[in-house]
Image (tube, helix red, strand yellow):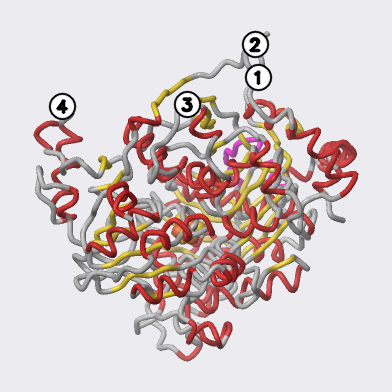
Amino acid sequence: MEKFTQLDGLVAPMDRANVDTDMIIPKQFLKSIKRSGFGPNLFDELRYLDEGKPDQDCSQRPKNPDFVLNQPRYEGASVLLARQNFGCGSSREHAPWALLDYGFRCVIAPSFADIFYNNCFKNGILPIVLDEATVDSLFKEVAGEEGYRLTVDLEAKEIRTPGGRSIAFDVDDFRRHCLINGLDDIGLTLEKADAIKAFEAKHQAAQPWLFRG
Amino acid sequence: MAGKTLYDKLWDNHLVEQRDDGTSLIYIDRQLLHEVTSPQAFEGLRLANRKPWRLDANLATPDHNVPTTLKERKEGNAGIEDPVSKIQVVTLDENCDDFGITEFKINDIRQGIVHVVGPEQGATLPGMTLVCGDSHTATHGAFGALAHGIGTSEVEHVLATQCLIQRKMKNMLVKVNGTLAAGVTGKDIVLAVIGKIGTAGGTGYAIEFGGEAIQQLSMEGRMTICNMAIEAGARVGLVAVDQTTIDYVKGRPFAPTEAQWEQAVAAWSDLHSDADAQFDAVVELEASDIEPQVTWGNSPEMVVPVSAVVPNPADQSDENQQKAYTRALEYMGLNAGQAITDIKLDRVFIGSCTNSRIEDLREAAAIAKGKKVAANVKQALVVPGSGLVKQQAEKEGLDKIFIEAGFEWREPGCSMCLAMNADKLGAGEHCASTSNRNFEGRQGFGGRTHLVSPGMAAAAAVAGHFVDVRDVLQAN
Ligand code: SF4
């Protein structure tokens, strides 16, 4: 998993409450054998005017000019500003996979669905909860300033705006540790690699037939 | 201090570390891989730039959606008509080739259902920890191995770290005393157990099956029982190691040889629960009480002896149970009080990781020999569990017996067990199936599955409705 320490990113606003996982990545794309490549279908139904099918070349599809991510000023955004209950719906990890594949590393919202919130951490995305008024003020600032960027500093647990304001946020220490060090469950277990190797050596000495070389 | 159960011993033997949050790091000796639950795990490894921890611990084969007709199979992967199935099988090949994992590919004689292939190759050994991204992995517990199903993210975790994060389960002993009557099998034992304790009865437990009736079973019979532990809610099923286990393992391709064999056999002699071991729960059954079983509903616990009638929801004390029974009767198109032997069959499926081994096919062939599939049965499939089972059956002439009786003789795979390939039930069709799940739509949309033993399935194919296989055996 990619480490997350500090991010200086262009912000895209998604001004809509209860964005569910089907909206983030519609179910016809879940049959894939991969966890990458979902980016072009992120927010598919909102983003394109036609109906999306798996294995399509999305660059040829008619885009919805009204959808925020289709506006040139938000191209290359890595911070998504969202409304309450973002990520509700299914437990599958395709939603964070799609956000990540598109390029988002941070989502800011007044609240998140539980499972989605957890799945974000597992996949190297930082979800930040801020109170409604603060989120509202950020929406206003983004709208008013083209090229609006935020600095998300996970080590200091704060966000800094172009105007010089810093906004503190809260995140579980353990999760913060994992993100900063790029540790997913596997990364965590691999921190114990020495213990595993020691066990393995003992195990192999006692039952060599379990190892075929 | 009380002695240890078999499960305790296996756990202790593989405990790398106890973690602060109450979970443990358990070392995994063997992982079996198939095409459905592995692609994202391999993808995850690639994205994170990781390598498998130990290549030789892994063994792969495609099974869930390989076609089972010779016509499609002749072409190898190119013959797979369904595009999603095809891409999964092709991806498994690519992943195994890329990472260097041993795979029995689609037309390798050793290909088959993972839970048939592992034991057959000796890749399943007593005392091992074994995992696979499939809930019927408990099958391998028949060898005194700690085996259970895992999810895709865990498949990746095991590939990358050779370990799994686990919490210890509780111990349950299911003891089957006495001797089974002729025609009554491991399948009937496990269905009777599920009928008794329910589909949640084993939740949170590792179930050890013991008692004379279990000791008298072949490895095939024991595998059938452990296979369905998950249908009783238990992720783990176990049988103690004895001479039957050792005789089965000996000489298999992945089994130890020579000095290591002697050393292994000596180590395996400890793979049983100590006489003074404490179980958290004990369930006892008398083998002589067990008749051939038939499921009538949409949960494996909805099961009765073949001599019984379809139960009446009104007789259930629990209101939720009443509703479930009513709903099941409706879905299955059955009436309360109807004799099980009056249920007419449209299709018969002999196969799946529960009952597709050589002994299962022999049992079915013995019933089908010299008979004909009844006119009302549209299709009777026999799908061997692996290429080697198929080869052995053909050597014994079982294929001819089936074909002459009007059964179709197929190539190995999961087939109609879960209807991921073209083998499916039509809506409303009743099927006598040797598989393990009778959920709504499991074998095809609207399909009506009745779980039975291979002998019962063959007898039903010939009669066109359920009959008591013991009567057929007596008449023969
Ligand atoms: S035979 Fe059925 S239950 Fe067994 S592994 Fe295949 S699909 Fe799963």
Same chain? Circles 1 and 4 = yes
Q: Earlier in the sequence, mark 2 or mark 1?
A: 2
Residue flagged by tag 1: what amino acid is it? Answer: Asp
Residue A141 in sight from this viewpoint:
no
Label 2 element class: loop
Q: Which residue is mark 4?
A: B317
Amino acid identity at mark 4: Ser
Residue under label 3, please give it.
B175
Q: Position of residue A79 (x, y in %)?
A: 56, 61
Mark in the foreground, 2 or 1: 1
Report which residue position mark 1 lands on: B274
Q: Residue at x 46, y 55 (%)?
A: B355
Q: Nearer the viewer, mark 2 or mark 3?
A: 3
Which residue lies under the disc numbered 2?
B2
- Measure how far apart labels 2 and 1 are at the Cα level: 9 Å
Q: Are marks 2 and 1 on the same chain?
A: yes
| Dot 4 or dot 3, earlier in sequence | 3
Assign a secondary structure to mark 1: loop
Is disc 1 surrounded by few (<14), some (14 to 19) or many (20+) residues within 10 Å? some
Is the Cβ of the residue at disc 1 closer than 8 Å to that at disc 4?
Answer: no
**How far apart are the two marked residues, 1 and 4, measured between alpha carbons?**
39 Å
Q: How many numbered callouts?
A: 4
Q: Quadrant of residue B376?
A: bottom left
Q: Is residue B388 positioned above or below A93 on the image?
A: below
Q: Quadrant of the N terminus of chain A?
A: bottom right
